[in-house]
Amino acid sequence: MDPQSGHLLVFLLLVSAIGFSPSGAAQKGSNGESPPESLPSAPGTLPHFQMEPEDAYIIKSNPIILRCRALPAIQIFFKCNGEWVHQNDHWFEESVDESTGLKALEVFINVTRQQVEDYHGSEDYWCQCVAWSNLGTSKSRRASVRIAYLRKNFEQDPQGKEVPIEGMIVLHCRPPEGVPTAEVEWLKNEEPIDALQDENIDTRADHNLIIRHARLSDSGNYTCMASNIVAKRRSASATVVVYVNGGWSSWLEWSACSVSCGRGVQKRSRTCTNPTPLNGGAFCVGTSMQKVSCSAQCPVEGMWKEWSDWSNCSPECEHQRERECTMPPTGNGVKPCEGLNQESENCTDGLCIQGAESGSDIALYSGLGAAIIAVAVLVVGITLYRRSQSEYGVDVIDSSALTGGFQTFNFKTVRQGNSLLLNSSLQPDLTVSRTYSGPICFQDPMDKELMTESSIFNPLTDIKVKVQSSFMVSLGVTERPEFHSKTLSGTFPHGNNRCFGTLHNRNKTPYIQNLSSVSSKPEMRVCGLFGHQGGRLVMPNTGVSLLIPHEAIAEDNSWEIYLSVNQGEPSLQLEGSEVLLAPEVTCGPLDLTFSTPVALTIPHCAEVSCDWNVRLKRRTQQGKWEEVMCTDDETTSFYCLLDPFACHILMDSFGTYALVGEPLTDCAVKELKVAVFGCMSCNSLDYNLRVYCMDNTPCAFQEVLADERHQGGQLLEEPKLLHFKGNTFSIQISVLDIPPFLWRIKPFTACQEVPFSRVWCSNQQPLHCAFSLERYTPATTQLSCKICVRQVKGHELILQIQTSILENERETIAFFAPEETNFLAHTGPKAFKIPHSIRQRICATFDTPNSKGKDWQLLAQKLSINRNLCYFATKSSPSAVILDLWEARHPYDGSLDSLACALEEIGRTQTKLSLVSETHTEDPDFTYSRQNGL
């Protein structure tokens, strides 16, 4: 028997032992074609595997396919885990290799999940191919088959960290167990991290994320992502906050001395911006401002020496004498001597007449005589003309003659249907621009003296000056009725609202007054009982209020808290160029302290700009005033926020406070409210107009209204605002366009002027000018004119007056919306706009820093609180204090819409939805509406 026959015999015996024949397998693979023995093969060549089975993973219940291909091959079979796979489980494909012409055979088998699970050997489930040729057999590599999986839970989740800038960040991650082993990928804010593009990041060390030098941009939410062929798993997110501790900038240069003469203060400041604290970093330690005392040498006044002796009598019959002004040397200059340094007089008592000049003297005297005669003729002519005009009862006055010194301005067309026009079909053209020039006009020389600042503003008793027959000027101080906060009519202003309501009728009382201060009772006062839930105390119609936050007062305690406004002469002694911008306000009891700051709101009259240096002052228990802070200071003891119409003060204790301003330039502006009132005089033909210029605060306007109610005055036109500059120029007030055939005001009496210092330093005391008009006949019942109020080299405004002087025909002017005065003290949850549950959630969200910077500092920024943030950083809940300040700033017009919009901008839309829904569900009594003006 030859060797080949021996090998074939062994093969047949082996095939018969496992229950199938190679020929049968070949027939199955060739779909009934000729048996494999008919294919040519190369004698003496072992099979060579062109394709070997590869390792595979069973995913879920899907079977895998193993395949192999050998050349030359008579038969190929799979053996798995040491056992032959049944021939019926094989699929064969036969082919002839084109390059060699040898027979190639390819075989496939399926391996199911059940087969792998039923195998309990010490090794993984494996399979390999065995191929036969005429020369012998060859075996392929073993291919393992495993069931793929990935468990759900990470063995170690990354943990959040807070690290300083430039610090190292290491986040650990151990992925879940799985087959095959899971690959790890890191995400930052849901975006994959590419360590190859950022040399500062390393993800190679055992799946950990390492950031060598932390940057602000590295703050974020980090997630470890594990995945294999079966599934993906996400770890819990780790929040990384990279914070920056604040550092002081360099000190600025010392400011100039605050006074030009005497003792003053120099300041220098620095800011916590090198760097600025970020993401909860610590604020700078220390003060942001330093003050030192300074002194400026005052100018020394020059002194006159004695007069010299009279000189000899000159040919002109005069002699002279002189004196010298001594100027002491000083570094700050001197003030020149006042007066003349030379005098001359006739040295012959008028007896010296020179012949050479007698002709010129005669000509001089002749000219003077002719001038006197001409003036006399002119006076007689004017007198005769006025008498001829008086026969018709008419005193025609051109309004252009009454407005000397005024700038160009335009008048709008009068209201339709004006009964004061003589011919209603001929409407006057009031849109033409008129230019007035010339000196300011007064009724006579005495008025000029009265108008000087040294005389007209001195405290006087009821002095009256009769000026011709139709103009009465009264200079004096009138008593005003006592004011009780609990008996208000509810028709005065509240808060900073500039809306208007109705003024009721008043008793008629004769009242003519010119350029005087309206006196008042010294104080208005309200009080309420407050406890742990806090509340709001409101001074009606003044804009003054006090917000007591929830938990500011200890639990189980309650206090009677009061609020008062000083309406008398201010007790604060102003220094230098200081101006009182708001009334003095006292809140008490003075010995009460709080666990969280309370918010005091005081209205002011300054136009907020960099032209003011606004300071808060407090009166000590000894009665002295001390400066608490400047609104630009960085301090942790007080917080002062200056809004356009009010100042909001956060404080821990009560006291008496005042707001003062120091103008830094001539462009500093005080806002004045101008209002016109009118009433009948004792003489039935006379009618009085009173023009008030007052600081634009509700307190000042309330004084005027209370006084006019007492005097029987009628508000004739909606009040308007005048921007009064600190440029030292006075205010001029004039009456224009009086109907010529119905009313008259004497020539050169329709214009009055108020000195600058009287208006600028009014200290919340209203001022006014009075004008007296006269009707020609009692049949005239309508008055139409214009009131022009302007500051020289400043702003001006026009008030159009059109009213009936009869009480029953007067058209009431809407000027202040009624305010509910029965509830001065609001306590408990209804005193606040934000429900307590919503407030707690907002505080819990923003008090904790997070990776995206959405902390209380961003909340403050969105609510327009951009400075002195170190004050809030010292509080246990900065967000709560910020929300208290928001409540104080929106007592009437505040709605939750603005707060919800701010939260939505920060990216917390869910907070807004909860805010709106819970407003309607948790507190049905709490509503807000822009239409209702809340």
Image: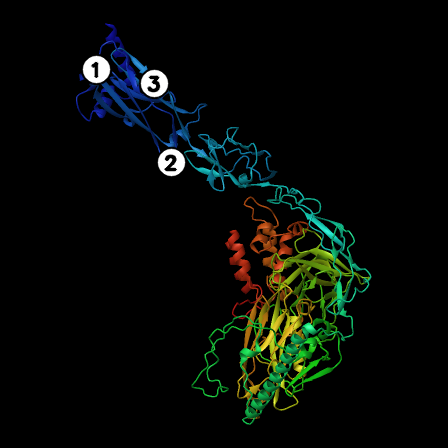
Q: How many marks?
A: 3
The residue drawn where x is 76% and y is 53% is 297
Q: Is residue 418 above or below residue 345?
A: below
Give the residue number, with chain letter if any, for mark 1: 100
Marks 3/1: CA–CA distance: 22 Å
Residue on which the image places disc 2: 61
Amino acid type of disc 2?
A: Ser
Q: Locate residue 12, reporting x and y percent.
A: 26, 15
Q: Report whether residue 934 is seen.
A: no
Q: Earlier in the sequence, mark 3 or mark 1?
A: 1
> Extreme front residue here?
355
Q: CA distance from mark 2 to mark 3?
A: 27 Å
Which badge, 2 or 3, is on the more N-terminal residue? 2
Q: Element at badge 2?
A: loop
Closer to the eye: label 2 or 1: 1
Can you say which quadrant of the picture contains the C terminus?
bottom right
Frontmost residue, 308 versus 352: 352
Q: Nearer the viewer, mark 3 or mark 1?
A: 1
Type of amino acid under label 1? Thr
Give me the residue at 48% from left, 84% from top: 418
Residue contact between numbered discs 2 and 1, judged by CB atoms under 8 Å: no
Callout 2 crowding tier (Cα within 10 Å): few <14, some 14–19, many ≥20: few
Q: Which mark is residue 336?
A: none
Amino acid tagged 3: Ser
CB within 8 Å, label 3 to label 1:
no
Q: Quadrant of the N terminus?
A: top left
Instruction: Report x, y in % for residue 270.
Output: 66, 46
Would you identify the image quadrant in which residue 675 lies?
A: bottom right
The residue wearing badge 3 is 140
Q: Secondary structure at mark 1?
A: loop
